[in-house]
Image: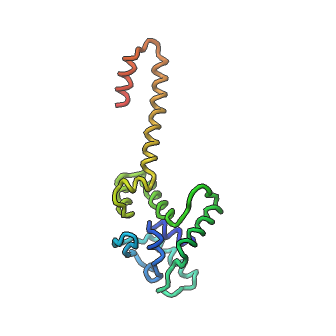
């Protein structure tokens, strides 16, 4: 299960694609090439050093299965059940965990690790093969986050308003001009 989690997180693939890989497709490869099952689009995925090492390690641990055998042999339903049990075990109780969580978590991790860069976001959107960046924003929960950040600005406004109101002799017109200048 640990290899599946790493593989899904690091490739950003759906389980329908992950479950088709054989050991021969992945061992000692610098890139994975596939046609996505859902979209039919061709994808090339760079295999990083960490994932490459994990694949070799698990291949050895599993006593070198045949190269044409699939790596992940569980059904989607069974895999999701195992992930849910694992999530509960580590204390994740209020989230719906599934194989898709691996893809989504990996994408979110890349976005956060790159300081929420718009350039990286556009690349992630392309990797996920979403129809638009708006779909990717909803997928990663960015829109909700951005709206929340806007509301945080009111906290600053409130503090400044209190400071200005505490000054003696400040009329409403002066207050309006000051706030207009500060916030525009």
Q: Position of residue 72 (x, y in %)?
A: 52, 77
Q: Is residue 16 left or right of residue 85?
A: left
Tell me the colour scheme of the image. rainbow
* Residue 63 lies in quadrant: bottom right
**65 above or below 94?**
below
Residue closer to the observer: 34 or 48: 34
Residue lying at 42% horizontally and 72% vertically, measured from the top left: 47
Q: Total marks drawn?
A: 0
View extreme (bottom): residue: 66
**178 above or below 122?**
above
**181 above or below 65?**
above
Q: Position of residue 142 (x, y in %)?
A: 43, 50
Q: Is residue 98 left or right of residue 174?
A: right
- Position of the C terminus, as image quadrant, is top left
Residue lying at 61% horizontally and 58% vertically, measured from the top left: 92
* Residue 93 lies in quadrant: bottom right
- Position of the N terminus, as image quadrant, is bottom right
Q: Position of residue 157 (x, y in %)?
A: 45, 29
Q: Position of residue 80 (x, y in %)?
A: 56, 68
Residue closer to the observer: 113 or 133: 133
Residue lying at 49% horizontally and 23% vertically, measured from the top left: 162
Residue lying at 58% horizontally and 80% vertically, measured from the top left: 61
Q: Is residue 155 left or right of residue 35?
A: right
């Amino acid at each position: 299960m640990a290899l599946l989690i790493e593989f899904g997180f690091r490739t950003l693939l759906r389980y329908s694609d992950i479950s088709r890989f054989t050991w021969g497709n992945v061992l000692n490869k610098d890139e994975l090439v596939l046609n996505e099952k859902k979209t039919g689009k061709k994808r090339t995925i760079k295999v990083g050093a960490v994932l490459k090492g994990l694949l070799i390690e698990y291949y050895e641990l599993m006593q070198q299965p045949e190269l044409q055998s699939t790596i992940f042999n569980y059904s989607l339903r069974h895999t999701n059940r195992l992930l849910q049990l694992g999530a509960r075990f580590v204390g994740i109780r209020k989230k719906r965990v599934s194989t898709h969580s691996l893809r989504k978590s990996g994408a979110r991790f890349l976005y956060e690790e790159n300081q929420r860069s718009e350039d990286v976001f556009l690349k992630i959107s392309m990797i996920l093969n979403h129809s638009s960046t708006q779909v990717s924003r909803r997928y990663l929960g960015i829109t909700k986050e951005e709206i929340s950040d806007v509301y945080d600005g009111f906290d600053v406004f409130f503090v400044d308003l209190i400071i200005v109101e505490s000054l003696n002799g400040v009329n409403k017109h002066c207050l309006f001009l000051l706030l207009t200048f500060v916030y525009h």
